Amino acid sequence: MTVFLWGALPYAAFALLVAGLVWRHRYDRFGWTTRSSQVHESRLLNIASPVFHYGILFVLVGHLIGLFVPESWTEALGVSEHAYHLLSLYGGTAAGVLAVAGILLLVYRRRTNAPVFRATTANDKAMYVFLLAAIVLGMAAKLAHSSGTGYDYRHTIAPWSRSLFTLRPDTALMEGVPVLYQVHAVAAWC
């Protein structure tokens, strides 16, 4: 199971992403955009969309820094482990809350505006569920392991993530990782 989850699943998810993009380009070239619902209601959309997009952008930047900037680099910049942990905890939680608030406002808008609700597809609904689950699981993992020095993912999850890009995944690194972090990672691949 370890080899599947941490060695095969990330590549399968990436292969499905590429195949889906190729398929859409080939068979649905002009359907790449979301169906605009701005004409039905824009007041709440003008609040919810930027809140979500800035939140998810900050989440992405935090993940890129946390997973791909080695500890030795932050130490060389004079950032102590404790300072890094606090930035990760508070910055990551704030970004996650911003993204979740944006998603919830967007879902509320879809549920309370009939024309917008009629334009909502099953794929839209599934996307909201999976995206919300991945973000909430990530925040839960971070908050559940935040006491003391917290869980130092830079010695396990980060090297594993980097090993995926060398096409030699070190699946053993993920064996001792707390379950919430593991479930968050699997949810992200889905």
Image (cartoon, rainbow, N blue to C red):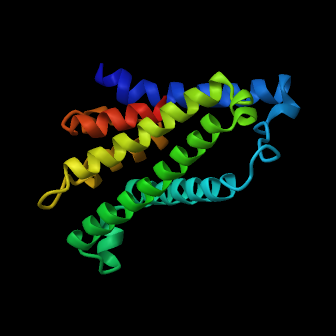
Residue at horizontal 56 percent and vertical 53 percent from the top: 52
Residue found at the very far top of the displayed protein: 1
Image spot of residue 67 (x, y percent): 39, 53
Residue at horizontal 21 percent and vertical 39 percent from the top: 178
179 relative position to 122: left or right: left
Q: In which quadrant of the rendered image does the N terminus lie?
A: top left
Q: Classify residue 91 by image quadrant.
A: bottom left
25 relative position to 91: left or right: right
Task: Identify which residue, 84 or 136, lies in the foreground.
Answer: 136
Task: Identify which residue, 133 or 84, lies in the foreground.
Answer: 133
Q: Is residue 1 visible?
A: yes
Residue found at the very far left of the displayed protein: 148
Q: Is residue 169 visible?
A: no
Q: Classify residue 134 by image quadrant.
A: top left
Task: Identify which residue, 42 or 55, lies in the foreground.
Answer: 42
15 relative position to 145: left or right: right
Residue at horizontal 29 percent and vertical 74 percent from the top: 75
Depicted 95 relative to depicted 171: above or below:
below
Residue found at the very far bottom of the displayed protein: 78
